[in-house]
């Protein structure tokens, strides 16, 4: 144990030398920089590397919808609204579309909320289609590339498939008009219809101020081994279990409900954020969709995320080495979760905690207002910048048409 | 329970729920004519009956195969043949085999809930997890806690009495939790006794147990004086053995918070913390006003007073005028026990202050020997200092109360079994007067002889046939105060107390 202890001290010392200054999230913990090219990418500055033109759409596509229901600013799909606001005042914005590399269409498709606050996606395809028709009619830039240099933010459950139910979403597929565009979405699952090649995965929106008001002192000892709060069975829609979360959450409950190491329940405690800061591992299992804001919360609060979602694509996967930060558990290995977690060597756990403590890591998961360097907005721009220059076949020859404007379910063709 | 939930969910799915299944929707299109409506109604009834009989999943499967035309077939692969489903009606037992579809390894649809054969915690893993937690917390302490923690030297004056075990065990448990090195100096009035030694031996801490020649007097005044002298004696031991660390005074009936031990590590030479005074008072509704304070606080606090720039400007002391004449004089009085103006326990010292021949001792400190010979009582460690301005206020400049002072003692003539071990076990039972046991005699036996701490007695053994109530009669009461919860022993209590008088 002696030489190991010295090695650890050495690593700590070197890690402390790499402490990065960050405006908001500075803590006095030696952190570890994500080594290699992947980690440094987080600090890239997109300004100067790309230019974005923001289409001026009539306010019925964005402002009016928000006025009708201001709850859209607080739910986990709020990234689309905040992205628009960020781009309007960002240095990458250009008012001259001729020099723009990317074109952004501000349409809030996830703002039609039920009384409960859940978004209904039934009108979203029509809304998107109507917006695209508008920009293709009023500006020539859509038609010259058929959307290959346009990007859209679609933060809903299954992205541009525009449905909350996976079977239906797969059946619909990605909206045909968006076939060539770049999609910025929260959903990510490998080999899935709703994840297009070249999409940028972003974290779901979590309110930064709210999380920062619940911070507790660093020296509070982490005494909870595994923490989770949320549903195991969606009693309203799938009472038996098996559909919801592909049975993974129910398996967690059934296997570990009486295990003292697992602090799991369906309660909504007021000390949820504080408890996460007192836990070593936080479970982030899939729900109806594989992504969840728990990942963001775990990263902010320094709790190692345990991701139980087969084939999930995590946010900014090309910039953040999630394998080194979180623990990935296959859904079929859930009954062995306690064995898996207790067999991780303590040095690995400490290293993951150091990586999580890196302020640039936490910044990259947030959408702060006003925007700060290294935050999620900038990571999106970095991702877009990395896709430049555009492919040769992005620009169509005059008269060439690729998109089928009448494809898709009949209901989508109705005007919005 | 499960079946009714299934029925409920079946009905839910039939209605337009938010994420309802679409499988039966196609069954409900276009019925405008009344015979058709009747037909559908009848069919609905038949469907309900069938589902009641066969169970939810099987009936749904039947309808699925009859009515479904949608392309959801592709992805509901787990819906195998009816026979297989029938054998898998208990969903939880088997995992589903994942169909490798061409697009994805992951299949949409109903999956089994995987439960391992014995879904209970494995003790080996629990131990490993605790080791991981311990390692993580050690790392946290190294990163965020106190750097270079010093040894804590706890000084406790005590004497053997009824409540000693109660108080000393409390202090002992607090000290056992301290994450730093600890030396516990226990000074006992009346000499070293086995009673005390047995209590502190259980701590596992490094203890120095010394005796003090004098016995503890019966008055609070005398007790305070003797305790001060005992503490000075302990400081003499620190000096003699050149113990290095932070000296704190852990009186045996005080209550310490763990943050106290973290906070005192920050002391340079001498520090003061705020002490909450819990007055043991019979009139509990009294609100106590601190001298010079605008608002009335429910609990008096002794400690340093700071101005806005966090500099020490004075002291909050206890205002005993309110209790003039009503306070306890003797240890077993029932009146409130008052603290001194400034309790010893609110101060912490760097042990080097009491060493002799130390070069870097500040010049505003008197030598310990000067206090020894002094005739007057040393009221607080402030007497060690020539000037009190160098005291460091701790605990966010006294705003945090880190320990509480409380004095509760039994009657001075109360008797208790030695080391609180009752040997041989009690075999007297006194039937309760108020329970409805039919053969309980209406009167209690009244001849009880008490002997001083002795084990034997010759009381009437009155065993009850069915139940026995553990008696409280053989040993005398520790407090004369009524405990009305004890049923039926009133008479014996009274007789006992009479005998004591």
Image: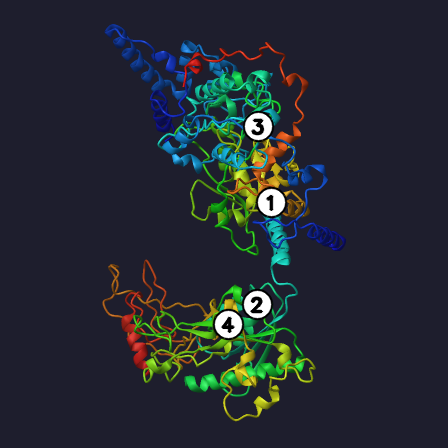
Taking the image as shown, residue B352 lies to the left or right of residue B294, namely right
Q: Numbered disc 3: what chain?
A: A
Q: Residue visible at 30% across and 80% down?
A: B498
Q: Where is residue A290 in the image (x, y as percent from the top left)?
A: 53, 30
Q: Earlier in the sequence, mark 1 or mark 2?
A: 1
Which is more foreground, mark 4 or mark 2?
A: 4
Looking at the image, residue B315 lies above or below residue A235 = below
Q: Where is residue B3 in the image (x, y as percent from the top left)?
A: 37, 27
Q: Position of residue A225 (x, y in %)?
A: 56, 47
Badges 2 and 3, same chain: no
CA gap, disc 2 to disc 3?
A: 78 Å
Callout 1: SS: helix
Callout 4: SS: loop
Q: Residue visible at 58% across and 70% down?
A: B201
Which is more foreground, mark 1 or mark 3?
A: 3
**Tag 4 residue:** B273
Q: Numbered disc 1: what chain?
A: B
**Tag 3 residue:** A96
**Tag 1 residue:** B125
**Tag 2 residue:** B203
């Amino acid at each position: 144990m002696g030489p190991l202890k010295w090695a650890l001290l050495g690593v700590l010392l070197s890690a402390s030398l790499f402490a990065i200054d960050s405006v908001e999230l500075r803590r006095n913990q030696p952190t570890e920089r994500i080594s290699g090219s992947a980690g440094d990418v987080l600090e890239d500055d997109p300004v100067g590397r790309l230019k974005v033109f923001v289409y001026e759409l009539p306010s019925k596509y964005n402002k009016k919808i928000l006025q009708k229901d201001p709850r859209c600013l607080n739910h986990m799909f709020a990234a689309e609204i905040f992205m628009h606001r960020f781009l309007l005042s960002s240095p990458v914005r250009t008012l001259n579309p001729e020099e723009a590399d990317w074109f952004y269409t501000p349409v809030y498709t996830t703002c039609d909320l039920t009384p409960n606050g859940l978004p209904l996606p039934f009108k979203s395809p029509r809304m998107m289609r109507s917006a695209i028709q508008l920009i293709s009619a009023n500006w020539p830039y859509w038609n010259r590339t058929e959307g290959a240099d346009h990007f859209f933010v679609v933060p809903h459950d299954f992205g541009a498939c525009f449905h909350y139910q996976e079977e239906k979403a797969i059946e619909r597929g990605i909206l045909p008009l968006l076939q060539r565009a770049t999609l910025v979405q929260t959903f990510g699952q490998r080999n899935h219809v709703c994840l297009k090649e070249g999409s940028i995965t972003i974290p779901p929106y979590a309110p930064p101020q709210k999380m920062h008001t619940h911070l507790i002192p660093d020296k509070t000892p982490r005494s909870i081994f595994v923490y989770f709060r949320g549903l195991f069975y969606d009693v309203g829609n799938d009472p038996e279990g098996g559909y919801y979360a592909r049975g993974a959450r129910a398996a967690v409950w059934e296997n570990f409900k009486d295990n003292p190491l697992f602090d799991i329940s369906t309660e909504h405690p007021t000390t949820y954020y504080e408890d996460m800061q007192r836990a070593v591992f936080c479970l982030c299992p899939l729900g109806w969709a594989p992504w969840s804001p728990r990942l963001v919360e775990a990263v902010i609060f320094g709790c190692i995320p345990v991701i139980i979602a087969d084939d999930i694509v995590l946010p900014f996967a090309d910039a953040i080495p999630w394998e080194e930060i979180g623990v990935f558990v296959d859904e079929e290995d859930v009954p062995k979760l306690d064995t898996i977690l207790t067999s991780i060597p303590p040095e690995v756990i400490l290293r993951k905690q150091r990586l999580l403590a890196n302020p640039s890591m936490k910044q990259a998961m947030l959408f702060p207002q006003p925007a700060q360097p290294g935050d999620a907005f900038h990571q999106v721009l970095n991702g877009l910048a990395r896709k430049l220059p555009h492919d040769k076949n992005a620009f169509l020859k005059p008269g060439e048409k690729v998109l089928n404007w009448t494809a898709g379910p009949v209901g989508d063709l109705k005007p919005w | 329970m499960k079946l009714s939930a299934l029925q409920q969910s079946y009905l839910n799915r039939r209605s337009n729920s938010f994420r309802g299944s679409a499988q039966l929707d196609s069954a409900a299109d276009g019925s405008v004519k009344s015979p058709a409506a009747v037909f559908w109604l009848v069919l609905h009834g038949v469907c309900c009956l069938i589902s009641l009989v066969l169970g939810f999943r099987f009936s749904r499967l039947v309808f699925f195969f009859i009515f479904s035309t949608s392309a959801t077939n592709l992805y509901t692969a787990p819906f195998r043949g009816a026979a297989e489903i029938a054998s898998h009606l208990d969903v939880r037992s088997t995992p589903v085999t994942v169909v490798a579809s061409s697009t994805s390894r992951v299949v949409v649809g109903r999956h089994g809930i995987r439960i391992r054969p014995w879904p209970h915690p494995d003790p080996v893993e629990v131990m490993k997890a605790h080791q991981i937690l311990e390692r993580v917390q050690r790392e946290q302490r190294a990163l965020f806690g106190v750097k270079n923690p010093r040894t804590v030297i706890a000084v406790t004056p005590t004497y053997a009495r009824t409540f000693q075990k109660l108080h000393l065990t409390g202090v002992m448990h607090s000290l056992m939790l301290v994450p730093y090195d600890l030396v516990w100096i226990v000074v006992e009035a009346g000499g070293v006794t086995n009673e005390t030694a047995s209590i502190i031996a259980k701590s596992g801490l490094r203890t120095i147990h010394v005796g003090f020649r004098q016995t503890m007097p019966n008055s609070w005044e005398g007790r305070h004086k003797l305790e001060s002298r005992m503490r000075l004696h302990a400081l003499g031991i620190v000096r003699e053995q050149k113990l290095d660390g932070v000296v704190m005074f852990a009186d045996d009936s005080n209550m310490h918070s763990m943050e106290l031990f973290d906070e005192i590590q920050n002391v340079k030479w001498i520090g003061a913390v705020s002490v909450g005074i819990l007055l043991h008072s019979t009139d509990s509704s009294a609100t106590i006003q601190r001298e010079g304070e605008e608002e009335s606080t429910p609990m008096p606090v002794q400690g340093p007073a700071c101005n806005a720039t966090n500099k020490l400007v004075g002291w909050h002391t206890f205002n005993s005028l309110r209790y003039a004449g009503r306070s306890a004089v003797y240890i077993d009085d029932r009146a409130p026990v008052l603290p001194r103006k400034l309790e010893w326990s609110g101060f912490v010292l760097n042990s080097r202050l009491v060493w002799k021949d130390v070069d870097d001792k500040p010049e505003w400190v008197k030598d310990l020997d000067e206090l020894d010979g002094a005739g007057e009582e040393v009221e607080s460690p402030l007497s060690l200092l020539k000037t009190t301005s160098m005291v460091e206020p701790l605990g966010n400049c006294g705003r945090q109360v880190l320990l509480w002072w409380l004095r509760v003692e039994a009657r001075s003539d109360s008797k208790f079994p030695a080391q609180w071990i009752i040997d041989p076990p009690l075999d007297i039972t006194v039937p309760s007067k108020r329970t409805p046991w039919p053969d309980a005699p209406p009167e209690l036996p009244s001849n009880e002889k008490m002997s001083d701490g002795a084990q034997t007695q010759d009381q009437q053994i009155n065993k009850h046939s069915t139940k026995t109530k553990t008696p409280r009669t053989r040993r005398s009461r520790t407090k004369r105060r009524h405990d009305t919860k004890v049923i039926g022993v009133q008479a014996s209590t009274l007789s006992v107390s009479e005998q004591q008088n």
